[in-house]
Image (spheres, helix red, strand yellow):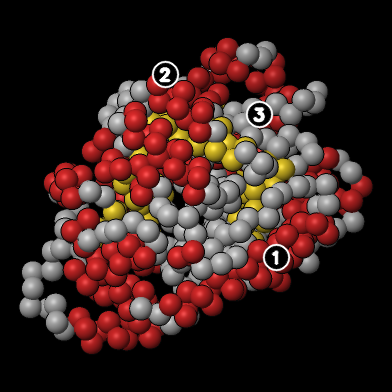
């Protein structure tokens, strides 16, 4: 029976080429490399079901390869079920879950999610919900719309900033529906189509997607993932002068994905550069409380303490307490915050009151957050040990906080490994997801938010997947339990 043509958008050849990044792995298996790279985009949700692919000639021109190679890659994708075609209608992305089980098919039951750097709800969440139910009665007589957030919660957030070295009042805080929501609000206010946004390379993928969705242009400044140099402040200075970005987006506390942290001296230099250029900076502090080696209050002051009134801090309860709360906040000058409140009316009318009461209860329990940091420190060490045992030629700098290891592999096979890992029952995010234009094929992010036994099993499966990518005999000696 001939495949029905689905309704769906079309992706151009140049756009697909950007998404694929450095897909060729230096071997003669060009068609296999290209097919694996496209499969990865499907598995990551970047190429949705029904997306129409460019014509073979257009894609060949965009990638700088022959039509023969494109045809061979599409043949592989049709055989594995990722692509369907019909004469006269072209090719489109099919549902990979419906294809026959093959060597690249992801395992359903028992698959380990090694893509999300986030933990289950912090112990005490249920008790906080019970306490919040009692406090809710105090708010039921109000209209319930809180565009800035509940005063009590904003007071607690402001006090934490003050304790960290950035004097803050509740009038400088607005509660949002998560840190990503906060970033999108700032993005809508500060940038428009064609505007440039300075980012780190690598950086948080969802921030890149938000920038692209606003039709803005991310301008990368490379980090040194080895930790020897970290932030290239001279490079930031040059990018500010040459590209004139509308704002910068930086993660200076346990940076996602590298885990690096900028010291106080570096923050002073970076803040001076940004202030001199009069460039607003959005500082993502989602991971700042996950200091696994010390007290977060003893860490370097917030970057905003050095960057002036154009600094906008974004925080969240998602990584520290629970992603299901969907609450975050913005800390900015009263002038900037007033503009953000006005811009917010085009998006939403405030965050849920009940969840804010719950978060207020959780923020009062410093001991629970201390226990979470202790637990994550054990998870981090378990992951580091498992990588040393199963993948001894991988290297990484042990992060002092955050939720993930940024691992360097001996060969540029990250995208291929992510595809192969799915067939071994583990989902991982390749390095290309964290690059502005793909690439980073020698790197992969491994979170340590799972219990040690799951981490051990995930790394064991990843080792088997790497062996299959390299074509070594070990791939045959590591069956999935």
Question: Sequence order check: which comes first, mark 3 or mark 1?
Answer: 3
> Local crowd at mark 3 within 10 Å, few (<14), some, or many (≥20)?
many
Disc 3 versus disc 1: nearer the observer: 1
Residue 263 can be seen, yes or no = yes
Q: Mark 3 points at which residue?
A: 23
Question: Sequence order check: which comes first, mark 2 or mark 3?
Answer: 3
Could you tell me which residue is drawn at 70 percent across and 62 percent down? 383
Which quarter shows the C terminus? Answer: bottom right
- Classify mark 1: helix, strand or loop: helix
Disc 2 versus disc 1: nearer the observer: 2
Q: Nearer the viewer, residue 430 or 108?
A: 430
Q: Name the residue under label 2.
A: 242
Q: Where is residue 281 in the image (x, y as percent from the top left)?
A: 35, 40
Q: Name the residue under label 1.
A: 381
- Classify mark 3: helix, strand or loop: loop
Q: Where is residue 360 in the image (x, y as percent from the top left)?
A: 30, 74
Residue 329 can be seen, yes or no = no
Q: Is residue 192 above or below residue 177?
A: above
> Local crowd at mark 2 within 10 Å, few (<14), some, or many (≥20)?
few
Question: Sequence order check: which comes first, mark 2 or mark 1?
Answer: 2
């Amino acid at each position: 029976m001939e495949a029905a043509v689905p309704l769906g958008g079309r992706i151009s050849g140049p756009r697909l080429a950007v998404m694929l990044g450095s897909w060729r792995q230096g071997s003669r298996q060009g068609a296999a490399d290209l097919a694996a790279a496209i499969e990865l985009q499907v598995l990551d949700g970047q190429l949705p079901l029904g997306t129409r692919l460019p014509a073979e000639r257009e894609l060949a021109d965009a990638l700088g390869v022959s039509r023969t190679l494109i045809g061979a890659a599409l043949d592989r994708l049709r055989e594995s079920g990722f692509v369907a075609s019909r004469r006269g209608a072209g090719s489109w992305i099919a549902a990979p879950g419906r294809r026959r089980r093959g060597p690249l098919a992801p395992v359903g039951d028992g698959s380990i999610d090694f893509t999300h750097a986030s933990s289950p709800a912090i112990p005490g969440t249920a008790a906080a919900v019970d306490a919040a139910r009692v406090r809710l009665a105090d708010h039921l007589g109000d209209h319930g719309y809180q565009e800035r957030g509940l005063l009590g919660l904003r007071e607690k957030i402001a006090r934490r900033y003050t304790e960290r070295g950035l004097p803050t009042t509740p009038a400088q805080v607005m509660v949002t529906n998560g840190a990503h929501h906060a970033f999108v609000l700032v993005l809508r206010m500060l940038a428009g189509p064609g505007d440039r946004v300075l980012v780190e390379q690598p950086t948080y993928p969802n921030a890149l997607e938000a920038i692209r969705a606003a039709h803005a242009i991310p301008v990368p400044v490379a980090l040194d993932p080895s930790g020897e140099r970290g932030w290239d402040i001279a490079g930031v200075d040059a990018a500010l002068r040459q590209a004139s970005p509308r704002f910068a987006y930086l993660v200076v506390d346990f940076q996602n994905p590298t885990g690096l942290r900028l010291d106080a001296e570096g923050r002073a230099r970076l803040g001076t550069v940004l202030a001199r250029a009069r460039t607003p900076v959005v500082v993502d502090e989602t991971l700042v409380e996950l200091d696994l080696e010390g007290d977060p209050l003893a860490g370097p002051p917030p970057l905003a303490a050095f960057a002036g009134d154009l600094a906008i801090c974004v925080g969240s309860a998602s990584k520290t307490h629970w992603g299901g709360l969907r609450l975050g906040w913005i800390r900015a000058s009263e002038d900037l915050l007033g503009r953000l409140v006005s811009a917010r009316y085009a998006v939403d009318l405030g965050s849920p009151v009940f969840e804010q009461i719950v978060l207020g209860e959780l923020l009062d329990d410093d001991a629970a957050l201390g226990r979470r940091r202790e637990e994550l420190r054990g998870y981090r060490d378990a992951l580091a040990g498992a990588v040393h045992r199963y993948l001894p030629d991988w290297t990484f700098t042990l992060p002092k906080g955050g939720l993930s290891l940024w691992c360097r592999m001996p060969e540029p096979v990250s995208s291929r490994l992510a595809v192969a890992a799915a067939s071994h029952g583990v989902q991982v995010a390749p390095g290309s997801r964290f690059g502005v234009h793909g690439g980073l094929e020698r790197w992969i992010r491994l979170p340590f938010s799972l219990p040690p036994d799951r981490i051990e099993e995930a790394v064991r499966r990843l080792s088997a997947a790497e062996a299959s990518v390299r074509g070594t005999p070990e791939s045959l000696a590591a069956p999935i339990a």
